[in-house]
Image (spheres, grey):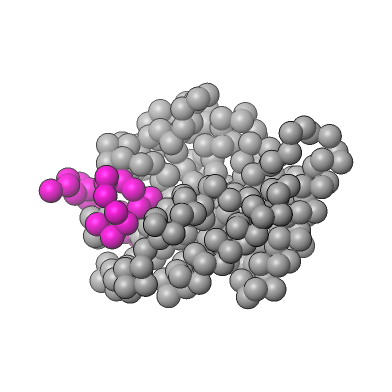
Amino acid sequence: MYPALPKSYKRAYPFKLGTTSFIYPDHITPNIKMLGPYLDEIELLFFESQPAGMPSRQEIKQIRQLAKDFDLTYNIHLPLDISLGAPDPSKRLTALKTIKQIIDLTIPLAPSTCTLHLPYDEAGFESEQIKRWQELIRQSLEQLIAAGIEAESISIENLDYPLEWVEKIISDFNLAVCIDLGHLIVNQFDIQAAFNRYYQRTVIIHLYCAESRHDHLSLDKLSPVNTDIIMPILKQFKGVVSLEVFSYDRLVSSLNFLEKCWFS
């Protein structure tokens, strides 16, 4: 038996509070059963593109029923091992097929968003290399939309390069944004500036602590400086906040820290 969360956080905040589908060392469905009574939303992790890791259509039906049972919603994290901007055409094609497959599979779950990484695959940082990468992403997105995927259903997550690099792409295709606060912290980007610039398009925030080589740490590891920046941001946010941690202990510590800061 896994330990349950100590209390319910449903509708406790102006935003929907969620966490990942890998808090307990088990498959997606057992995690949902344990977490569903206590949180507003679950981030379903599809970190690997291998078909063996995908739920069956029968499992999707069960996951959909659990959402009704627990008054729960979902968001999807698309795989990390794909790239719409890869120089290799076969890798871009694999990325397109994978994204469409997962979105088609999870449509019955009515996810709030499908979060996508756009990794920078070029060897250097010359302006021509960046432009080439941007053009490949544009071509891939055009193909994705032509295949019937709604651009608004996809949120682009900030990574280890300035999100400004893909800002025009996001705007032109009317994509949403996922602000990952841990990535902002570890890359020493300006948290407040990023939120101010993209909050109108931001539908989900990934919230956790990150330090140099360590990330997805519990929130109680946040520095006082970053805590003082992040809490006012959360106070004005109405989307989804996903505590992006991957263990029970880190989740409970994060929930306790968030509650303490919120009501202090």
Q: Name the chief secondary structure element in magenta.
A: loop
| Residue lying farthest to the front in this orientation | 90
Let me know if residue 13 is in the magenta part. yes
Q: Is residue 215 above or below residue 166?
A: above
| Image quadrant where one finds the C terminus | top left
Q: Is residue 164 left or right of residue 263?
A: right
Of 60 and 221, nearer the camera is 60
Image point (69%, 73%), residue name: 146
Of 24 and 260, nearer the camera is 24
Q: Is residue 69 left or right of residue 229?
A: left
Q: Is residue 169 left or right of residue 210?
A: right
| Residue lying farthest to the top in this orientation | 212
Image point (49%, 64%), residue name: 102
Residue 83: percent from the left, percent from the top? 63, 50
Residue 137: percent from the left, percent from the top? 73, 55
Image point (46%, 32%), residue name: 215
Of 83 and 77, nearer the camera is 83
Q: Is residue 57 above or below residue 161?
A: below
Image point (76%, 61%), residue name: 139
Residue 236 shows in this picture: no
Residue 105 shows in this picture: yes
The region drawn magenta spans 1-30
Let me know if residue 18 is in the magenta part. yes
Residue 34: percent from the left, percent from the top? 23, 55
Q: Is residue 26 above or below residue 37?
A: above
Residue 67: percent from the left, percent from the top? 32, 69
Of 37 and 31, nearer the camera is 31
In the picture, residue 159 is in which quadrant?
Answer: top right
Q: Exactly how many numbered labels are in the figure?
A: 0
